Amino acid sequence: PIQIPMTLRWKAVPPAGRLAIGFGVVLCLGIGAFLAGLVYGVVFIGVPYPDAPADVMQRQAFHMRVSTFVAIGGLAAFVIGLFGLAVTICVYFLTRGSTNSH
């Protein structure tokens, strides 16, 4: 079997580091979802026709709602990840000098 060095094991990562990794993943997924929503809008909506028939306008409105929903969800995930990462880093730096042993 392959031996993994202790520095690469998940248990070796301190809890604050695990939390920071989690929020970093949420932040990256938020960026990805936001960009996916924008790309979806460009691909499926494109430039709206000025005098489009009603069925085309309904289809464009549907795709616009989907694009907006995905982009806003991605933006929300980005903000949650950014805020969580900032709080985790602040708490880490504020508590790293304190000791619990007396």
Image (tube, rainbow, N blue to C red):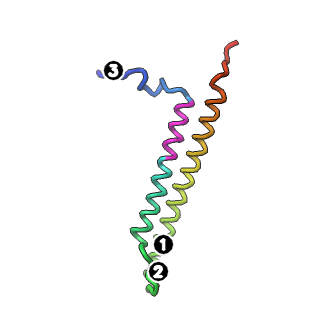
Q: Which mark is residue 45?
A: none
| Residue 88 locus on image (x, y percent) | 60, 36
How dense is the environment of label 1, judged by Cα within 10 Å: few (below 14), some, or many (20 and up)?
some
Q: CA distance from mark 1 to mark 2?
A: 9 Å
Q: Which mark is residue 3?
A: 3
91 relative to 24 in the view: left or right: right
| Residue 52 locus on image (x, y percent) | 44, 85
The C terminus appears in which quarter of the rendering?
top right
Q: Amino acid at mark 3?
A: Gln
Marks 2 and 3: CB-CB under 8 Å?
A: no
Q: CA distance from mark 2 to mark 3?
A: 60 Å
Q: Earlier in the sequence, mark 1 or mark 2?
A: 2
Q: Is residue 55 above or below residue 43?
A: below
Q: Is residue 92 above or below residue 101?
A: below
80 relative to 61 in the view: left or right: right
How dense is the environment of label 3, judged by Cα within 10 Å: few (below 14), some, or many (20 and up)?
few
Residue 41 part of the magenta-drawn span: no
Q: What residue is pinned by disc 2?
A: 57
Looking at the image, the residue that sits furthest to the left is 1
Magenta residues span 16-27
Mark 2: which secondary structure?
Answer: helix
Residue 17 part of the magenta-drawn span: yes
> Magenta stretch: dominant SS?
helix
Q: Give the image quarter of residue 36.
A: bottom left
Q: What residue is pinned by disc 1?
A: 62
Image mark count: 3
User: Residue sitting at 42 percent across and 64 percent down?
Assistant: 40
Q: Is residue 102 above or below residue 45?
A: above
Mark 3: which secondary structure?
Answer: loop
Q: Earlier in the sequence, mark 3 or mark 1?
A: 3
| Residue 20 locus on image (x, y percent) | 54, 36
Q: Earlier in the sequence, mark 2 or mark 3?
A: 3
